[in-house]
Image (cartoon, helix red, strand yellow):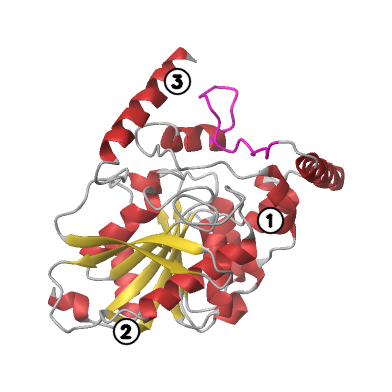
Amino acid sequence: MKKLLLLVAFAVMICSAAFAGWDKTFALSDKVEHKKVNFYNRLGINISADVYMPKSRLENKKLPAIVVGAPWGAVKEQAAGLYAEKLAEQGFITLAFDPSYTGESGGTPRGVALPQVWVDDFSAALDYLNNQAEVDSSHVGVLGIGSGGSAAVGAAAVDPRFKAVALINLEDKGRIARLGYDDVYSPQDFQAHLEEIADQRLKEFNGADRKPVLAVPEEYSEDNSLMANELFSYYRTKRGYHPRFVNPLIADGASWVSFYPLSQFDMITPRPVFFIIGEKAYSRYFSEDAFVSAQDPKELKIIEGAGHTDLYDNEQYMPIENLKVFFSNTLKDDSWQQM
């Protein structure tokens, strides 16, 4: 426990120093321009985002764009921002955002994660990009990371302005709410889960503090699951620690039970979908099952040797070149070749 506290204190110190200027978990690239922006979703919630643009873009040349969605509870200063920066280096205009109720975005109570609101955040990001002079608004794609892939698919299913969809280590949050990880819930387990949610909801109605799911544990332990320790290795260490990251709330779980975005791939067709998964990722089964249910055109890429969070920030495994090729081909714009 003492070692953990020292590690967190170190991370806080590093982040606090960075907040005087650059506040990300990654370095600012000298190949891109960055700016912080704000816009409102349809619920009137102020969304905070980072926009990245290649410095070497041609004057008066509109570029294709990509909206990048972070995992559940994560913020734009982590993996989503890193992917946005890396893809901007490849010639795209990119936007990474904090979902409603999270990070620097507005909305109360804090830390809430509701599927329909999250889906609208993606479309609100697209609304913003469509109003930027530098963006080719007819060529915008979406990239969802981890559980952010659930909302990205939900957004693309109902918003035809997203012309291509890429998903990195997709997690189906609706399926998790119904079946647990690895589909381990029995019918009795599921009912107990719903009762836990209902009990927590009543406690909060009567004044109790909102209680999070400890998806990312406070300590590393051999007794933890593979998933828990892999998430710990990113979110609780200097790799990816950020003080605005939050664990999801127990009472939000009921909203996800009726969320079935991965049954809506027929609504995305014929727009292309690209699944990217780590060979050793605990989440691998989500993408493999979704790939089977998705219609053509579709593509699946397995990154050998990679776990789930390896694809968040490990440049040995990050599929930037694969994403560059996919989005360059599917967004039908060759301006990146002129960089």
Q: Is residue 202 visible?
A: yes
For the record, the magenta segment spans 209-226
Q: Is residue 235 left or right of residue 16?
A: right
Quadrant that contains the C terminus: bottom left
**Kind of element beneath mark 3:** helix
- At x 54%, y 36%, the residue is 216
Asked which quadrant contains residue 142, the reply is bottom left
Q: Secondary structure at mark 2?
A: loop
Residue 80 badge:
none
Residue displayed at 31% across by 79% down: 132
Q: Mark 3 or mark 1, which is nearer to you?
A: 3
Q: Amino acid at mark 1?
A: Arg
* Residue annotated with mark 3: 4
Q: Residue at x 58, y 48 (%)?
A: 110
Q: Nearer the viewer, residue 247 or 263?
A: 247
SS assignment at label 1: helix
How packed mark 2 is, by other alpha carbons closer than 10 Å (few <14, some 14-19, many 20 or more), is few
Residue 328: name its quadrant: bottom left
- Circle 3: residue type: Leu
Residue under label 2 = 332
Disc assigned to residue 175 = 1
Residue type at mark 2: give it: Lys
Q: Main secondary structure of the magenta part?
A: loop
Who is closer to the viewer here, 224 or 195? 195
Q: Position of residue 70 (x, y in %)?
A: 46, 55
Residue 213: where, in percent of width, then height?
Answer: 64, 39
